[in-house]
Image (tube, helix red, strand yellow):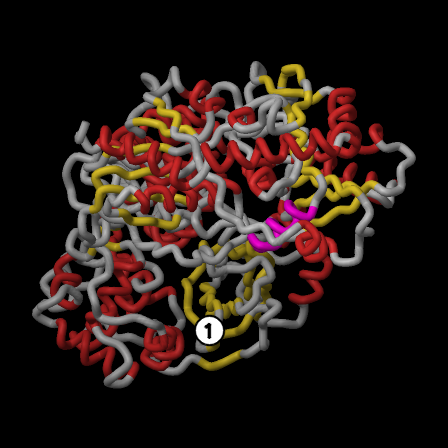
Amino acid sequence: RARAMLDRARGRAIAGHVDAAREGVLYGWAWRADAPDCRLLVDIFVEGRFVGQALAHLDRPDLRDAGIGDGRYGFELLVGDRLTSDLRGVRAFALAGRRRVELMSPASRRETTSIGDPQDYLRATFAGLRARDGCEASPPGRAPQGAHPRWERLLAPSAPGGPTNYIAHIAHRERIASDSDKGRLLRDYLLRYGRRRGRMRAPLSAGDIAYLTAGPNGDAPLAPGRAQALLGRGARNDDLAAVCAWAIYDSASLGVEDCLVPASHRRALATPDSASESMTAPLSPFMRRFLAGSPALTTIPWDDEAGRKLAWFALLLFATVMPQVLNYMPAEGVARFALAGAPDEAAFDDFLAKLFGATGYSTARWRADIARAGYDLARQDFASRTQDGGRLYAAARPAPEAPLVDVQLVGPFTRRLGVSDSCRALASALQQTGRSLRLCDYTLDHPNTSRDSGPLALAPPGPARVTILHLNLEDIPAAIAYWPDVFTDTRLVAFPYLELSKPEAVHRLGLELVDEVWAASRFIADTLGSHAPTHLLGTACKPVAAIGRSAARSRAFGTSIDKEAFVFLTAGDAYSGAHRKNPLGAIAAFRAAFPDETDVRLVVKTHSRQRIGEASERETWQAVDQAVQNDPRILLMDRVLEDDEMAALLEGADCLVSLHRAEGFGYHLIEAMRLGAPVVATAYSGNLDFCTPQTAWLVDCALRPIVAGEYPRASADQTWAEPDLASAVAALHAVRCEAQTRALKTAAARELVARDFSTDALAARVGTRLARCLGEV
């Protein structure tokens, strides 16, 4: 790779490359052969829209090893979700002299264009502003100031001298060593978690920010803050150039430009010198340095008012994608040109009209774009900064104006997973209670395949007397941190699923943030009952109309399986965990039960295997692949099915086998029962609410410790079930051979599901509990 880079660089005055995109960050390099000490600015576009400017000055040992100068020509830009790993639509241009030279990338056209006057450069760079969909309506601003007890709990210390509750929670969730010193923990939190969140600002307390910005003092006001060294951006010099590089480029590439620039740095960059302080449009040291350092803007004259206004307007345009520049512009200038009704607002409007055309862009749209970028013009600071000096994305997201409802249900309605089915079932039950209801989709940290919302009327969150978070406990802190604050004046209920017999450290904060827990199964209620007020509500099986076994079998398998074959099915998506769902256990039982029979089949249904990164999970699926290759009676179905296709698969199978090691509830099992399919299941965990000796073939098991790597974040003392192979073999034989017993059990199962797990039954239980929550009992 180094040799290839050197070959690309040879013979070119300006060389560079867009290398990669990872978790929303763009990586590349740019080098000027005839001026190796020059650090180039790089303008970056995605799908034709300017997304930011980077400074190519980061150390790249691979460049140095390849003989490319001193190697300090790397750049990084935090772009966010719009950036795809294949670099589709990404173009980068190095600014050198009066030229803009395109760097190599998959989308590169290798263009070199001359830079005209500053207005031409601004018009070409910010053309996307005119094309952007949007209006002059006021976008969301900041959450109202005042008491926010759940925010306070997020940012409170988890222990005396320890990290905040939120950072301790993320350390458990992301497997970040939390017993290290404070600096290393904050570094790992910001690099491994915070940068991935990007402009959805990862929570920091005022104390964390003070710690990370410490360093400058009265004798050395430009000394680097602690964050610069911790995050790998240590400054070589204590001068204004280094301060500016951190404040504008490096902090932004790390997603901390809103909070980790020391106050003394901000003052040094933003305070006009005495010579220009009395001018109509004073320039700050930052503004002078930015203009002088940009080849496209160096011709702007500073010595007259018209030139200074042009300088101001150019920087105000850059603020639409780099809002941090507003922190280093004199406050009186922002008030003069940019605020609604400002004395010289018309001058800024005239400039925009001349630049883009009379119908192209306006100060009102500019203000809307600044607010969307997370900046509060009135305070001249980022909206994510809390009133006590902390940082929380929710602070920049006031709840949309909406009527107060009795109940608000929040959950992953548009994701394809069991929790989504449960969420929809609860929504149907709530609708039957007659309470005013709002349904809100929650997809953060749910990478599962999308599904259509169907007839559900989903809405943005708003005020509610009771808010139900149909999320797992580990997801609740992020909902509080990143969603608008609809959680302060409400009774907050968690409706989580849990497969472990006791909560882990990663569940603790979620339990502390809610007022009570509703449990879908007795297993979950028993697990959480001693840790929070818990009520067993159960859940409902989604209504699916049977189409008849013959039609279902034809739809599910087509001609791939003989009509006479007895088909066993085991199912579970890869995200649910192969060790927990245990497809290898089902395969072993099937092969032991029917070593020589040719008229039996086992279908292993899953999806999303290619998205799984854990080594032990991949090994398990490789073992499944090997079993499929070795036994033609075993078929692997690895794809996402629509709901009606999955129902046909369950109804068309002769038996659903679940040799799970733990289940919070077991939705496939109860759906199979509703459709009349026999069920073989491990006699452990949430499925025992409906898997009884009368309704299913229960497989004996013994509790055993969960081995490291089998389940995310499980502690060494956690246990789950190990199904007994002999018991499983006997159950498969019985299902296959005992037709009368099969008929009795499936009839009993259907009756139980209809009685206890219908929408009507759930609505009755939920209605009773809601009456108590709303103070009516």
Specify the farthest residue to the right: 596
* Above or below, 64 relative to 774: below
SS category of the residue bearing label 1: loop
Q: Nearer the viewer, residue 432 or 497?
A: 432
Q: Which residue is mark 1?
A: 48
The reply to whether residue 420 is visible in this rendering is: yes
Q: Residue at x 33, y 42 (%)?
A: 430
Residue 30 pos. (x, y %): 55, 62
Residue 106 pos. (x, y %): 62, 68
551 is within the stretch colored magenta? no
Dominant SS type (magenta): helix
Badge 1 crowding class, 10 Å Cα cut-off, few under 14, some 14 to 19, many 20 or more, is some
Image quadrant where one finds the N terminus: bottom right
Circle 1: residue type:
Gly
The reply to whether residue 64 is visible in this rendering is: no
Residue 466 pos. (x, y %): 25, 37
642 is within the stretch colored magenta? yes
Q: Nearer the viewer, residue 171 or 449?
A: 449
- Please give the range of residues in magenta: 641-652
Q: Residue at x 82, y 41 (%)?
A: 600
* Above or below, 67 relative to 661: below
Residue 766 pos. (x, y %): 33, 34
Q: Residue at x 71, y 35 (%)?
A: 583
In the image, is 768 to the left or to the right of 656? Answer: left
Quadrant in the rendering for residue 120: bottom left
In the image, is 30 to the left or to the right of 586? Answer: left
In the image, is 38 to the left or to the right of 292? Answer: right
